[in-house]
Image (cartoon, rainbow, N blue to C red):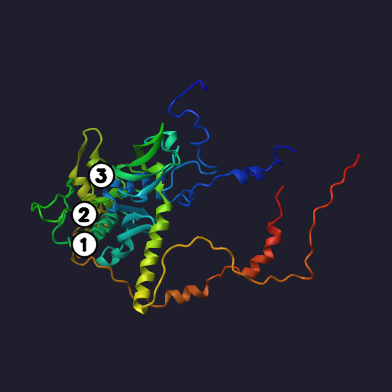
Amino acid sequence: MPHSFGYRARTRDMFKRGFKEKGPIKMSTYLTPYKVGDIVDIKANAAEQKGMPHKYYHGKTGIVYNITPRGVGVICNKVVGNRYLEKRVNLRIEHVKHSKCRQEFLDRVKRNAALKAEAKEKGERIVLKREPAQPRQAHHVTAEGLPQTIVPVAYETTI
Amino acid sequence: KTPLDTPIESRAYSSRYQVKCRHRRESETDYHARKRLVSQAKNKYNAPKYRLAVRFTNKNIIVQIAYARLQGDFILCAAQSRELPKYGIEHGLTNWTAAYATGLLCARRALTKLGLVDKYEGTVEPDGEMTLVEALDDEDAPRPFKCYLDAGLKRTSTGSRIFGAMKGASDGGLFIPHSEKRFPGFDVESKTLDAEVLKKYIFGGHVAEDMKSLQEEDDERFKKQAAIRGNPTFEPSEKEKDCREESLKYKTHGLTCEQRAVRVPGRLEIPP
């Protein structure tokens, strides 16, 4: 059982800035716009001590529900006992960044819309569903010389 | 090995050294100030936050109205004191008066671009009084264009030319929140601004006092300001020779891939 339970207990490594990433926070952190409904990753930035998330939320992803002059409110789901609780975390922008998980989906939506329009023009039928990787097709394999048959070596006892 | 032999920049030093970002290395940007000047309140989303950036070179004053975006800063409009000869100010292009005129020019250009030129005249006859541009009475009327002074790396001491440019822009009709504390003519003890002194600076009176032969220019400077208000549009000057062609003659091209490959073995040697 640990001796201390402070708010930032056991965060020595978690909240460390990266190697050669110390110093002032880059400007793009302050220039990225956030809108309500955006999906964001929470990552504490120890260079800004205000509006930091509790260590539990470091690495969690949530949805923005509120925007204030210097920060955002994020909704995260936390497992408490046998259920998820919806938690609302108020964070400064420095500790938040847009999640790429959403971007992949949005790109696909755009691509599908374009493909659908194209197919409609040509009058073709198009399948837009993603397919998991299929087993390999039947194919010929060439090798130099005859293949070598490998057989397990007979067990030898050496007493 | 003596202390003289051990290199200060050993391999360990180089591999662990964290460079500051480029504009800091080149002493071009004060990021402490920039962060505060440029970041917009998140609940104002993408609304641009304009700043009046005033920079001085040895022979030129550059005044730009800029706003920041992820791709880089965008410039709404700019003015340089090199353009002042077109308006009749031929000399002293980096003095207080030129700063005032450049700020004025930038402001009028910006307002022309935004269509606010007639609504916000600013102070047409500068009298050195401290005035902030006020919104028009009509509720539907557009509010004044607001921007914040960006002094860059210059020291903001009383009487500095940065504030000359700011006063020019403010008198030109832009709303730049400021106080009278840093204008020439501000008395530290009594905490009041002597408008006469400021007015003298606006018209180059401080220069005139030094050089008696310039006394007659007082009137002319006023005419020059009227010229700026008359036509602040930017017209590129006619060039006698094609500058681009000339500079291409002297251009040194970078190394090609093959030439660089020749150098690689030498650079792979690990320094002691």
Is B68 or B204 nearer to us in this picture?
B68
Query: Which amino acid, mark 2?
Result: Phe
The alpha-carbon separation of the residues under discs 1 and 3 comes to 28 Å
Residue for badge 2: B145
Of pointers 2 and 1, the one earlier in the residue sequence: 1
Of pointers 2 and 3, the one earlier in the residue sequence: 2
Point out residue B184 in the picture as x, y percentages from the top left corner: 26, 44
Q: Residue at the top extreme? A: A3
SS label for mark 2: loop
Q: Is residue B134 left or right of residue A133?
A: left
Query: Which amino acid, mark 1?
Result: Leu
Of pointers 1 and 3, the one earlier in the residue sequence: 1
The chain identifier of the residue carrying mark 3 reads B
Point out residue B10 in the picture as x, y percentages from the top left corner: 66, 44
The chain identifier of the residue carrying mark 1 reads B
Tell me, for residue B183, which label it has, or none: 3
Asked if residue B71 shows in the view, the reply is no
Judge if badges 2 and 3 mark residues of a common chain.
Answer: yes
Quadrant for the N terminus of chain B in the image: top right
Judge if badges 2 and 1 mark residues of a common chain.
Answer: yes
Is A94 or B143 nearer to us in this picture?
A94
Say if A89 sits above or below A107 in the image: above
Point out residue B240 in the picture as x, y percentages from the top left corner: 38, 77
Mark 1 or 3: the one toward you: 1
Residue for badge 1: B114
Asked if residue A144 shows in the view, the reply is yes
Mark 2 or 3: the one toward you: 2
The chain identifier of the residue carrying mark 2 reads B
Q: Residue at x 38, y 39 (%)?
A: A77
Tell whether label 1 touches label 2 (CB within 8 Å).
Answer: yes
Say if B5 sits above or below B75 in the image: above
